Amino acid sequence: MTRMANIPYRMSQTSAHLRRSVMRDLLSLAVSPDMISFAGGLPAADCLPLDQFRDCIDTVLRRDGPRALQYGPPFAPLRDWLAVYMRSRGVECAAENIFITNGAQQGLAIVARLFLNPGDAAIVEEVTFTGVRQAIDGQGAIALTIPANADTGADIDALEAVLRGSPLPRLAILISDFHNPLSVSLSLEKRERVASLAAEYEIPIVEDDPYSPLRYAGITLPPIKAFDSVGAIIYVGSFSKMLAPAVRLGWIVAPAALIPQITVLRETIDLESSGLMQRAVFEFLSRGYLEPHLAALNATNRERQAAMLAALEERLGDAAHWAAPEGGLFVWVTLPEGVDTWAMFQSAVDRRVAYIPGAAFAVNGGHANTLRLNYSNVKPEMIREGIRRLAAVVREQVSERAAARISATGLES
């Protein structure tokens, strides 16, 4: 047995700033077999392309042999495919603008390291994905927040006010499509304006965009990066939601002049992405598997979202409100004022249903009466049962709050 050293470790500033993702802690409570979990951000497990991807890996190993298992530079055919893909979405892009990462989270971390020093300011939405906050916290940066809501997304007037204010931000991070957790997508007008502001104030804005392929209603919009004429928008994409999370591949689109610095920063973390995974993903893409896979995945997502919205309307239509997103994986629910979704989480787990409290995504606190529900990895019949259980917990909370108010009024009188 190894004895733990009893010494006063002197930890780095980075380790002091970082906090574990609240979602990871909550998910660990929601893994029992009889739990109906709306907590994760997982694609539909029954839609993962197991047979196709297995065949792609087998083909790569047979064809490429030891090369597929060696160290190596970014796989050039995959970079070429990504450049074509981004051009199809309206982005002026060549392979030299593509940097392959281990998922979007690593992309965010690399870009944060590229631009932020300890004490610098970075703009984020007041409600945002926890990984965004972790990326800037890891650099000891200060978060300057702008309002965001589930109806219209980020407040771009507020973004401009912060860009021209003090302290001068060094970076901004926005989620453009099917926001995690709000599920909202930025309008075309807002996308154009964000790109214009980045150019005007010469401050890089990171577009975090892992969800845009998961659209099954409405009109597909070009990314913010499509309106970037000066290289001020840094795009971060991912295969995690459009193919499978465990491939751990994503990409950055940036000016070619930044790629050498990005490469060096990446080398200090883990050298490179798996050559085997890069080759297998390219094989999957080059065979034309992605489009039918996304069609099936989004059809499943559409069915499950409809089941959740219908169940919410039936069970909580008079006690909560939410928006109906045109894609993505989540529904953002706002409950009556005074309901605390942290406080009721254990009651929900006791009833074998789980979610993520909205406050977990709130950079400056608040939003205690909100929660995020994932529908993509739960079958419709279980969605209906899970919402039934959740509604019972919510109504208990509402009744308890009402009783407390009545009791307080009686004491005051």
Image (spheres, rainbow, N blue to C red):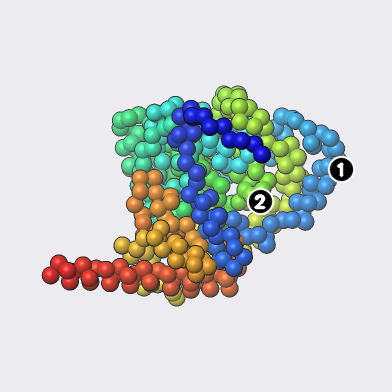
Give the residue displayed 62% in from the left and 33% down from the top.
99
Give the residue displayed 86% in from the left and 40% down from the top.
63
Q: Residues within 10 Å of mark 2 (few under 14, many from 20)?
A: many
Image location of residue 367, percent across then percent down? 36, 54
Taking the image as drawn, is residue 187 in sight? Answer: no
Image location of residue 199, percent across then percent down? 43, 31
Give residue 62's mark. 1
SS at mark 2 in the image: loop
Image location of residue 316, percent across then percent down? 41, 72
Q: Amino acid at mark 2?
A: Ala
For this rendering, which residue is in front, 224 or 249? Answer: 249
Q: Amino acid at mark 1?
A: Arg
SS at mark 1 in the image: helix
Give residue 339's mark. none
What is the spatial separation of the Cα atoms under label 2 and label 1, in whole angstroms?
Answer: 22 Å
Is the residue 324 above or below the residue 130 in the image?
A: below
Q: Residue lying farthest bottom?
A: 314
Q: Which residue is disc 2 drawn over?
A: 244
For this rendering, which residue is in front, 384 or 55? Answer: 384
Image location of residue 296, percent across then percent down? 66, 61
For this rendering, which residue is in front, 310 or 10? Answer: 10
Give the residue displayed 59% in from the left and 60% down from the top.
31
